Image (cartoon, grey):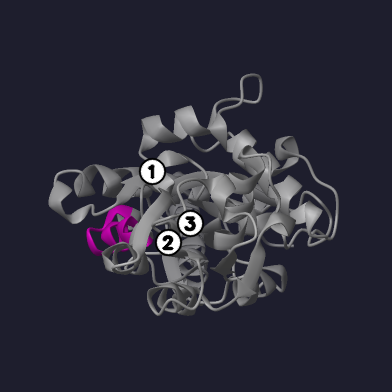
Amino acid sequence: MRMRKITGVALGVVVLMGVLMASALVDREAAAEPLKIRYSIWVGYGPLFVAKEKGFFKEEKVDVDLVNIEDPKEGFFAMAAGRLDGVVSTIDTMVLYLKKGNEYQYVLALDDSAGGDGIVARKEIQSIKDLKGKKVAVNEGSVSQFFLNVVLKENGMTQKDIEVVNMKQGDAGAAFVAEKVDAAVTWEPWLSKGKAAPHGKILIDSSQTPGLITDVLIFPRTVIQKRAREIQGVVNAWNKAVAFWETNPDEANKIKFYDQAGNKKFFGTAAKPGDLTRVVQNSLDIWGGFDKLQVKATPKELINYSFIK
């Protein structure tokens, strides 16, 4: 068999071409498969779009496709089916969609409602305990119901102590303004509208319950294992976007964004957990109490500390 002799230079060219072709293939694959992350219309997710518009994702060499799906149920179903890589949603929402008990994890806190959610009530209702026997409008199955039940729990009450009127989120606030209910669990702008009504006041808002209504970035463990570098890039880009946002404080409204330091404090560590563990446990307790959970789970299984270091 005759063999063609290859010089050192020629061999180097061949190797270089192979490396370049492989690199180009990887780049094409990365470009063809962006991280698809579900979001809904909410000002708290603003830094994701800042990261995209300012090129922070690009700086971190990660391609992100932000997919608008308003219903969190549809978002989690799409993620379970592999049509999405991740979702942003509230802490308590994730536990509702666990089927194995540990298939999803929180990797980053995005924002904390610092007064944007709460309960409006008639002026004669002076405390949470005064809600006993009263008609309270709330969207069952939503973060508002979770918020209500944590507040009731902290005052030695349960939902059985009040008369729940199940309504859509916006309808709950409107019903209170129209004096059809004694109180409503809602968010802005209905909090302000309820307070402005002649009979209304804000009984409690989320500025008094830090960390309770927090949006988080969630990924399946399988995606975390395969695409950890890209997820870290998303986290880094978020931190850059929040830092950029902080130079424009007038735009912040009533939203507290979690920066890198805030995430470290909120997550804590496995050895010394932060407030996130408490909120996750509340989520498991509240929704478990309504038989909404499909499996048993623990905060330790659901929190991934590796991306916020």
x 59%, y 70%: residue: 84
- The mark closer to the camera, 3 or 2, is 2
Residue drawn at 48 percent across, 67 percent down: 34
Q: Give the residue pinned by disc 2.
A: 122
How far from the left and from the top, in percent, is residue 250?
14, 52
Label 3 crowd bin: few (<14), some (14–19), many (20+), radius 10 Å: few
- Residue at image location 59% in from the left, 63% down from the top: 134
> Can residue 248 be seen at all in this image of the molecule?
no
Disc 1: CA contacts within 10 A as few (<14), some (14-19) or many (>=20): some
In this view of the protein, which residue sits in the foreground, 26 or 236? 236
The amino acid type, in three-letter code, at marker 1 is: Ser
Instruction: Classify mark 2: helix, strand or loop.
Output: strand
Q: Earlier in the sequence, mark 3 or mark 2?
A: 3
Q: Please tell me whether mark 1 sits on a helix, a strand or a loop.
A: helix
Magenta segment's dominant SS is helix
Q: Which residues are magenta?
A: 45-56
Residue 53 lies in the magenta stretch: yes
Indicate the amino acid at tag 3. Answer: Val
Q: Is residue 157 left or right of residue 200?
A: right
Q: Which mark is residue 207?
A: 1
On the rendered image, what quadrant is the N terminus found in?
bottom right
Q: Nearer the viewer, mark 1 or mark 3?
A: 1
To which residue does mark 3 refer? 14
Question: x, y (%) of residue 118?
Answer: 44, 55
